[in-house]
Structures are given as structure tokens and as C-alpha cells.
Amino acid sequence: MKKLLWIFLLLCGLILATFAFFGDTFENLFSLDATRGLLREHRAWAGPIAAALLISDLVLPIPTTVVIGALGAVTGLLSAVLWGWLGLTLAGLTGYGLARWGGQRWADRLSSPEEQARNREFFNTCGGLAVILSRMLPILPEALSVTAGLAGMRPRAFILSVTLG
């Protein structure tokens, strides 16, 4: 469990580092006015563009609240809620899926089979609540989605949790 915690903290640190190095650039690039202008200019595609930006927040410091707020200003509240939920859900599923099915060799190198079994048990008992609660906070959703995938959280439980969160 200790190694998984270190991986989670390392992921949080990497996400914070992208904010430290590129945050100002992305804050200016995706200010409320700039994002609203982008979405207004491509109004017919505003929802999918916003969802794509939210998915890219998995690796880039995209200000998600600004994107969703700008989308609401351009297309209305219901559209912003639906596209925002879709984008954030797909971001979580992408992080989970990449780690779950692409990171198994990495997990095998970092932890013993016994550790992996304990991590999987933890995520299968407490992970759902952790995923739901993390969705309301910055940084944690991305890191926790990847960590849940590496730990081998059951896909059905993760999908349900990320969808509800």
C-alpha cells in the first residue's frame, strides 16, 4: 500500500508541476473571455470542444471550471452540465483505462503480487467512495483515476463511481 501511496503522491506532484510550469500560459490561453470567445466562435461544436478540453485536463493544466462556466454562458446551463459531466467522466475513464490496461507491467515492477492484492482489495472496498469524493476537488480526480487503474479496481465499480462523482 505504501508504494501505491507514493505513486499517487508522485502523480499529484506531476500534475502540480504542470500547473507551476505552464499554469500561467494556460490561464491566459483559457481565461473566461478567451474560452467563451472560442466556444462562441464554434458554437455548433462548443459542447464537444469543451468535453475535449476537460479530457485533456488529464495531462494539461486546463481550468475546468472556466471551461464549464464559459460553455454555460454560450450554450446554457443544461448543455454545460451535460457536456461538463461527459468530459469529466471521460477524463476519469481515460486515466483509469490507460493505467489499468497499459500500466500493468509498471505495476508489476513496482509492487509484489501480495501488495497488488492488498491495493486491489482496498480500492474494491473503499475506492468507490474515494473516487466520488475526489471529483469535487482539483488534482485528485486525475491522480486517483490512474491509481485506481494501477491498483486493479473493478471496472464496473470504477465506472459507477466516476459516473456518479
Image: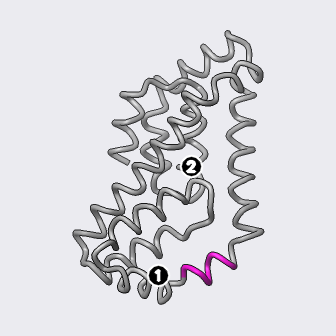
Image check: 84 left or right of 135? left
- Foreground pick, 40 / 145: 40
Point out residue 67 in the picture as x, y percentages from the top left corner: 45, 73
Quarter of the view holding residue 26: bottom right
Residue at (25%, 74%) from the top-left corner? Answer: 77
Kindly identify the amino acid type of the residue bearing the numbered disc 2.
Glu
Q: Which residues are magenta?
A: 25-30
The image quadrant that residue 21 belongs to is bottom right
Q: Which residue is mark 2?
A: 142
* Residue at image mark 1: 35
* Residue at (40% x, 49% y) in the render: 89
**Residue closest to the eye, 134 or 155:** 155
Kindly report the secondary structure that dominates the magenta region of the rendered protein.
Answer: helix
Q: Name the residue type under label 1.
A: Thr
- Residue 111 drawn in magenta: no
Query: Residue at coordinates 72% horizontally, 44% vertically from top-left?
Result: 9
Measure the C-alpha gap from mark 2 to mark 1. Answer: 22 Å
Q: Is residue 39 above or below residue 151?
A: below
> Residue 13: x and y, percent?
74, 52
| Label 1 environment density (alpha carbons within 10 Å; few <14, some 14–19, many ≥20) | many
Of helix, strand and loop, which one carries label 2? helix
